[in-house]
Image (cartoon, rainbow, N blue to C red):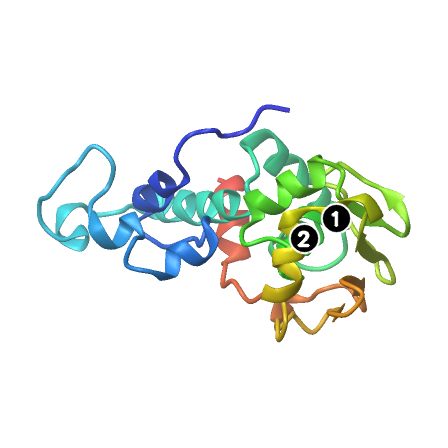
């Protein structure tokens, strides 16, 4: 499947907002958004609020792109998730965010097995992760309540895994997940709800964008 391969920091600069796409680097002074406080193609200039006035449609597009970039989903796949969310009972916007949160690559990221969703996606694609003792290399796989996420035995011999064991100690996970640091195993306790998604996105605005 096609995916964005350009510099992810450019996406943050485009939206003028930190999306934490590169993990720990985003929280340091090395973050390009800290050093280059301007949109791509517009070096320098006045402050963002003074430079341009955003229409209602622009705000809706901004919110949609923010969610899409954050979860690393291309437009076509994002529309498919939106269609699935619309078929579920409840608010479509909330359903959409919950479905995205249930992606396997996101769960691997939330458990602390990767510093970013992009790294988590690569970890899954390389076959390092087991779901209910079965090797799964599809990042968009949707997890269910009770699923167990763990590392393949051969992957535990890698240098990356050894570093991760030390770094993950004291990791705080969302309430809908549990993490056994000793066994490096995660479990889906329950399905996430809107309060269990720590990133603050406005699902209603995305619904308005697609409803125009």
Q: Is residue 90 above or below residue 157?
A: below
Give the alpha-carbon distance from disc 2 to disc 1, as whole Å.
7 Å
Picture residue at 30% right of the left edge, 44% below the top: 13
- The reply to whether callout 2 and callout 1 are in contact (CB within 8 Å) is yes
Secondary element at image label 1: helix
Residue 38 vs residue 58, the one in the foreground? 38
Q: Which residue matches tag 2?
A: 161
Location of residue 29 by image quarter: bottom left
In the picture, the quarter occupied by the N terminus is top right
- 208 left or right of 11 in image: right
Picture residue at 31% right of the left edge, 52% below the top: 31
Residue 59 vs residue 170, the one in the foreground? 170
Picture residue at 63% right of the left edge, 49% below the top: 160
Q: Provide residue 27's location: percent of width, then percent of height.
A: 37, 61
Label ID, residue 157: 1
Q: Provide residue 155's location: percent of width, then percent of height.
A: 76, 45
């Amino acid at each position: 499947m096609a995916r964005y391969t350009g510099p992810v920091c450019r996406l943050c600069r485009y939206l003028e907002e930190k999306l934490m796409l590169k993990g720990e680097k985003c929280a340091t002074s090395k973050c390009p958004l800290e050093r280059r406080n301007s949109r791509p193609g517009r070096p320098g200039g006045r402050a963002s609020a003074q430079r341009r006035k955003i229409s209602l449609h622009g705000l809706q597009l901004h919110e949609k792109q923010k969610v899409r970039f954050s979860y690393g989903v291309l437009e076509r796949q994002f529309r498919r998730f939106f269609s699935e969310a619309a078929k579920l009972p409840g608010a479509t916007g909330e359903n959409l965010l919950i479905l995205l949160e249930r992606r396997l690559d996101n769960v691997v990221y939330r458990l602390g097995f990767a510093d970013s969703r992009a790294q988590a996606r690569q970890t899954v694609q390389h076959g390092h992760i087991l779901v209910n003792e079965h090797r799964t290399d599809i990042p968009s796989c949707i997890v269910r309540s009770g699923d167990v996420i763990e590392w393949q035995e051969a992957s535990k011999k890698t240098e990356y895994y050894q570093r991760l064991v030390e770094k993950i100690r004291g990791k705080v996970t969302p309430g809908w997940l549990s993490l056994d640091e000793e066994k490096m195993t995660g479990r889906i306790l329950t399905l996430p709800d809107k309060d269990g998604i720590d990133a603050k996105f406005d699902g209603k605005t995305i619904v308005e964008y697609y409803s125009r």
